[in-house]
Amino acid sequence: MDIDEKESYCPYCGENISLLIDNSIENQEYVEDCQVCCSPILISVEIDHNGNILMNTRRENE
């Protein structure tokens, strides 16, 4: 298992957050609470064929 740390932002409070991404899984979707405001963030991750990590954060209820 290979883990990368990526920076993103919270769609609720706008603060930068740090996320640990398991880059051995091509497509992932999970919920993680914001480290600042504790709101649930829906995180979508896609690893392309070059190993680039594409990530999207949005509110859980969107």
Image (spheres, rainbow, N blue to C red):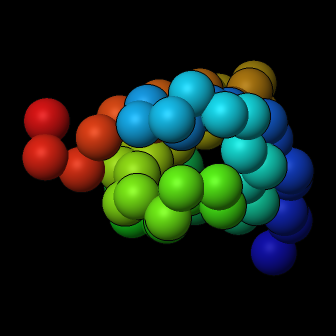
Question: Which residue: 86% across, 52% down?
Answer: 4
Image position of 19 (left or right of 46): right
Image position of 48 (left or right of 61): right
- Residue 31 pos. (x, y %): 39, 64
- Residue 26 pos. (x, y %): 53, 49
Is residue 39 visible to us here? Answer: yes
- Residue 43 pos. (x, y %): 44, 47
Q: Nearer the viewer, residue 61 or 5?
A: 61
- Asked if 10 appears above or below 30 in the picture, the reply is above
Residue placed furthest toward the left: 61
Question: Which residue: 66% across, 61% down?
Answer: 35
Question: Which residue: 86% across, 65% down?
Answer: 2
Image position of 57 (left or right of 25): left
Is residue 27 visible to us here? Answer: no
Q: Nearer the viewer, residue 43 or 60?
A: 60
Question: Which residue: 78% across, 49% down?
Answer: 18
Q: Nearer the viewer, residue 31 or 48?
A: 31
Q: Quadrant of residue 25?
A: bottom right
Image position of 56 (left or right of 20): left
